[in-house]
Structures are given as C-alpha cells and as structure tokens.
Image (cartoon, helix red, strand yellow):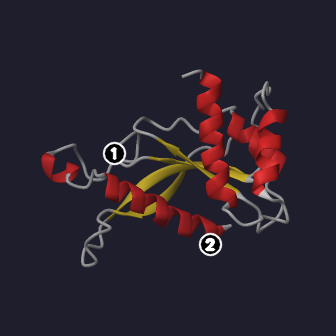
C-alpha cells in the first residue's frame, strides 16, 4: 500500500468519526471531506506554535468491575492553537502500542487548522508513562485488553468534552 493511500484512509476515518453522518456546522461531509483532502495532497507540515507538554487524566483501571475504584494516570497531549468555537470539532488521535511523544507536525494539525479544531492525542495504557501498577507482572497485565483500551477512549472522550 502506498503511504499516501494509508494517510488518506486514516484521515477519512478520523473525519467520519469527528463529523459523523449528519452535517457539522452546516457542512455536508460528503462534499467537504474529498475537497479538503484534495487541497492537501502535498501539504506542508505545520510547526506547533506552543507545546503544552504532557497532561494527565485519572483513568479507571477496571472498566468492567463497578466495585473496583482503582485508577491510574494516563498521559495525553493537546493542541488548541486553532480551536475557536467551543462547540467545534475535537480530533482524538490514539497513540498506538508505543510511547506517545506528544503533538507532532502532521496532517492532523493541518486538518485542525482548516477545521478550527482542537487536536488531542492519548497514550495507550501500559505504554510510555501510562502504566497502571508498579510493574508488568501477570497480575497487573490482566487489565491490558482491547476492551479496557476502548473504554479508556470513551471515558477520556467524556472527560475531555466536558472540560472544553
């Protein structure tokens, strides 16, 4: 697969999640997305105006046990350089199974500027500095699952949306 095709695919998924099937701010996604992507076929990466450094979110350790109130600190980064409208879009980028190194020059920042959006990237549990517990023992790794990671995203999304 060509790198450009992969970037295009990821961008389309992000935009579909952010904008949904309904018109967002009066713009039909079916028309706006292809036009936006074509206009940035050869984009120049932006230089982030200011790096806020890492931020921390108190995340639930076990989303599947309502009697378990344990938490851990999950790292995230944000860029609100282009965020104008309090009801505007927020792009949530997920650092995969690797250490999150913060907001980088990327196509997502170009989209954030175009859409006047906030851009947030969340570190995956058990990677980087977002490690629950003191070690990577079998007991602690019991909370490393796709289900827990998906609930992390949903929980963080709810928190972040309220904080904006």
Task: Please identify the residue farthest to the top as the structure is shown.
Answer: 2
The residue shown at (78%, 28%) is: 41
Mark 1 burial class by Cα count in 10 Å: few <14, some 14-19, many 20+: many
Task: Please identify the residue farthest to the bottom as the structure is shown.
Answer: 67
Residue 34 percent coordinates (x, y): 77, 42
Left or right: 68 in relation to 89: left
The residue shown at (45%, 40%) is: 96
Mark 2 burial class by Cα count in 10 Å: few <14, some 14-19, many 20+: few
Q: Earlier in the sequence, mark 2 or mark 1?
A: 1
Residues under numbered marks 2 and 1 in contact, where contact means CB atoms less than 8 Å apart: no
Q: Does residue 50 show up?
A: no
Which picture quadrant has residue 28?
bottom right
Viewer-closest of 158 and 61: 158
Residue 131 percent coordinates (x, y): 34, 47
In the image, residue 86 sits, relative to residue 108, either above or below, namely below
In this figure, which residue is indicated by the disc labeled 1?
126
The residue shown at (63%, 32%) is: 7
Left or right: 13 in relation to 65: right
In the image, residue 24 sits, relative to residue 109, either above or below, namely below
User: How far apart are the alpha carbons under marks 2 and 1?
Assistant: 25 Å
In this figure, which residue is indicated by the disc labeled 2?
162
Residue 114 percent coordinates (x, y): 83, 46
């Amino acid at each position: 697969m060509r790198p450009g095709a992969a970037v295009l695919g990821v961008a389309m998924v992000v935009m579909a999640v952010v904008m949904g099937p309904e018109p967002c701010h009066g713009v039909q996604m079916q028309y706006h997305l292809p036009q936006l992507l074509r206009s940035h076929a050869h984009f120049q990466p932006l230089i982030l105006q200011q790096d806020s450094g890492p931020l921390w979110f108190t995340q639930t350790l076990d989303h599947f046990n309502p009697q378990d109130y344990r938490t851990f600190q999950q790292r995230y980064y944000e860029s609100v350089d282009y965020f104008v409208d309090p009801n505007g879009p927020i792009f949530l980028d997920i650092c995969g199974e690797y250490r999150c190194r913060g907001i980088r020059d990327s196509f997502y920042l170009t989209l954030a500027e175009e859409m006047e959006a906030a851009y947030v990237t969340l570190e995956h549990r058990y990677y980087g500095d977002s490690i629950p517990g003191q070690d990577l023992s079998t007991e602690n790794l019991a909370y490393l699952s796709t289900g827990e990671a998906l609930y992390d995203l949903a929980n963080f999304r709810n928190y972040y949306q309220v904080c904006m």
